[in-house]
Image (spheres, grey):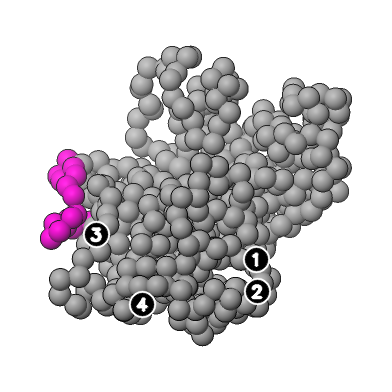
Amino acid sequence: MSTFPEHDLRPAPAGSSMWHPFADMHAVKSSRTTLVRAEDVWVWDNTGARYLDGTASLWYTNVGHGRAEIVEAIARQLGTLDAYQCFGDFANEPALRLADEIARRAPMDAGKVFFTSGGGDSIETAAKLARAYFAARNQPDRTILLHREHSYHGTHGVGTALAGIDPNRVGGPFVPDVVRVPAFDAEALDRVIGTLGADRVAAFFCEPVIGAGGVLAPPPGYIEAAAAVCRRHGVLFVADAVICGFGRLGNWFGIERFGVRPDIVVFAKGVTSGYQPLGGIVAAGHVAEPFWDEPGRVLRHGQTYAGHPAACVAGLVNIEILERDGLLDRALKMETVLEQALQTLVDHPLVDHARGGIGFLGAIELDADRLAEAPALPATVMHAVRRNGALIRPMGTAMGFSPPLTATEEHIDLLVDTVRTGLDEIHRAPRSSLSNGRSAS
């Protein structure tokens, strides 16, 4: 059990002015789920209802909720050096130590770590660095960034441009020289680079397992073949490990699963298990070299809170827990448990198929005919499952799962049973209520 005290904040007013991300505020403003505490795989709302966290919040609570040792380390750090920027020649001990720990685990030689405040910031950093690297190598025309169908790389300017999920491109893209390629076709990637001209392409952004785009694992050999295409053309291979890193695929950055040594790794989320906002990139030695070994060359980029000492302390303790508790190995074991459990749902009339098998994450694809009748079906499923005590995420036409790495087989059984109960409620409801956008209750 957690040793830190119950939260003691006054309840928020019902008519809060808070604008939620990715939310229909017309609906949310009158119906919020306000969470007040959490422990391991469980969270509680302000009515006392308990939920099994089937998504590790937003893919990131890898070590579980309520780890007192992380909270206490953050508090100690705030009482010593609360905050200071890392621009120019400033640093702090936690940032220096965490950079070394991350670089030591990264799947590249002589890696250098550039901290940010989160995943979207890190994508911006990787894109700027890729272009700056080629400019430093007297190849300033190499500015094109490649991304894949179904990809998700955050919602900042570059991330919006790199969005392979079309609804996420609303309001953008504003970044030039961005080209989409098929998600799982290395030959198509090769053709696109050839058509564009390799001397114009800077980087290829690749999630080891596509996360928000539907939990789409790559077919055998695809990641390796795509990396080989990039090497052949001199294109930087950027592994987006924001979701896949820090244990989610059973290793530190996800990409190691495929034997690929990327030029840049992007990380966030699981680096602190969400206890503090933190992200960053690891640049391979050859990418960092122009900026580290040549005098006077400055990457004019950075975020105010990058390298924040309290965030970096959270990262250090989080890594200790991941190693001490064997959570990377546990993820490898539990990926099969989760996949097999999700497969038990494929007989349900609302489910088309289940996906999983590479990493402790998975999805169920909803039936296409029912989706055509009721486009809001994923949100309806989410709410029905929540009413029955579990939290899962709608992702386009699917429902996503990514529990904390501490989840047990019993937790997974309970999660899937709860999902089936929610699906049954919806299936029994009149179809007209679903087509009108109302969830079963």
Looking at the rendered structure, which numbered label has been put on residue 300? 3
Real-space Cα separation, disc 2 to disc 3, in angstroms: 34 Å
Q: Main secondary structure of the magenta part?
A: loop
Real-space Cα separation, disc 4 to disc 1, in angstroms: 26 Å
State the residue at coordinates (52%, 77%). 197
Based on the displayed image, in which of its 4 quarters is residue 93 positioned? Answer: bottom left
Q: Say which amino acid is labelled 2.
A: Ala
Is 280 colored magenta in this rendering? no
Q: Nearer the viewer, residue 102 or 1?
A: 102
Query: On the image, numbered disc 2 is attached to which residue?
Result: 188
Mark 4 vs mark 1: give the one in front: 4
Is 83 colored magenta in this rendering? yes
Real-space Cα separation, disc 4 to disc 3, in angstroms: 19 Å
Query: On the image, numbered disc 1 is attached to which residue?
Result: 182
The answer to whether residue 218 is above or below residue 120 is below
Q: Say which amino acid is labelled 3.
A: Arg
As helix, strand or loop, the secondary structure at mark 2 comes to helix
